[in-house]
Amino acid sequence: IASYHVEAAGGVYEEVDQTEMDRAIRAHRLASPDHYRIYFAFAQPANAPGVGDFTDLAEATSLSAGAAAELLRRWHGQRLTSGVTRAEIMLDRLAAAGLTMPTADEAEHLLIAYSNVMDELAEQSVDDFGGPDVWRRAMRSLPALFEALGDARQAVMRRMFADGAALAWLTSIFRRETFAHGRHGDRPDSHQLLTDAELDVVGETMLARYRAMSFADFAAGRQPLSMLFAWQQGGDQDGPQRLVGAEILTDTGLLDVLEHLSGRVLTATPTSTREHVTLSRSNIATLVDYDEVRRRIERLAEGGSDETTRTRAGSLLESFRNGDRF
């Protein structure tokens, strides 16, 4: 008995593989976060999805992409006591169990909904180095949904990437696949969502969208720097440079551009976490002449034409210094 208790205590705080958790959920096991309380209190855990949630999801995905999108928006406004939203919980369960034999239409409706709402949902989701948590959860469901499309797979992908309003989320998939296929970087990944032919279609579609955008369009998006990187990494090195170069000809344009190209670094101490705004050579040197724009900012911080210009330039100069440190 003593030996048993030692072993059990040693496993209380172990990290659980997501695949194992998915398996426990599907089998209604004691280890399932949706079912464990039933075994002890004959009640469902407070944050677990109910039968009605799965019914709502099935009805919405059967109806239309618009209905699925509205359901995701409504769910994302419902934050649970665990800190996550109902949408995030349901996306996890969708990845674990999937729809009940999803049809091609159901899969299409949900994928089109993703392509239109994921940037909106990111506004209320925890954002870490891997991007918003809701994106990570939705990403896990993509392989099964793509497979369910059958012969409609490529046409639906083209529609998602050509028309989807969630351009930052679509960009995150495009960049992921560009690296996974070895088209940029030196670490191809066997866990690919798209075939080579599908990535050709997605790449052609996304590059066309980027080329049609003004810098103001990029700046209005969630992750402008990521989109500019995707444009370059997708095969057009010069396009982003020309776009940014035209914007920074004036001092005001330079300030506007650099404020939107800034990155973020978090540092933590035992008592606090601090965010630092950065402009690092590694992040912006493929888009601008790093040394030249830094010299321009130094001059503006010292002798800009007005107080607002000097203040903005001073903040950007501090971001350059943070880029040196972090």
Image: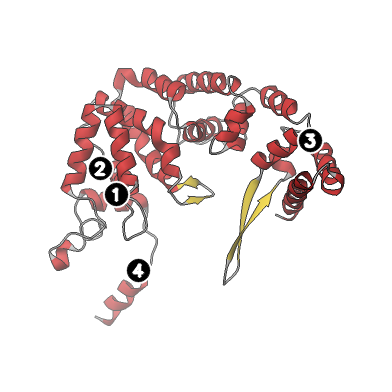
* Image coordinates for residue 184, horizontal then vertical, percent: 61, 31
| Residue at image location 36% in from the left, 72% down from the top | 10
Identify which amino acid the numbered label 4 is placed on: Gly
Q: Nearer the viewer, mark 2 or mark 3?
A: 3
* Image coordinates for residue 63, horizontal then vertical, percent: 22, 27
| CB within 8 Å, label 4 to label 2 | no
* Image coordinates for residue 123, horizontal then vertical, percent: 46, 45
From what the image shows, is residue 321 above or below residue 201? Answer: below
| CB within 8 Å, label 1 to label 2 | yes
Task: State how far apart marks 2 and 3 are (Cα).
Answer: 54 Å
Q: Which residue is mark 3?
A: 251
Which type of secondary structure does the marked residue at label 4 adopt? loop
Q: Which residue is mark 4?
A: 11
| Residue at image location 38% in from the left, 40% down from the top | 138
Q: Which residue is mark 1?
A: 22
The numbered mark, 4 or 3, whose residue comes first in the sequence reads 4
Q: Nearer the viewer, mark 4 or mark 3?
A: 3
The numbered mark, 1 or 2, whose residue comes first in the sequence reads 1
Identify which amino acid the numbered label 2 is placed on: Ala
Which type of secondary structure does the marked residue at label 3 adopt? helix
Q: Quadrant of the N terminus?
A: bottom left
From what the image shows, is residue 101 above or below residue 73? Answer: above
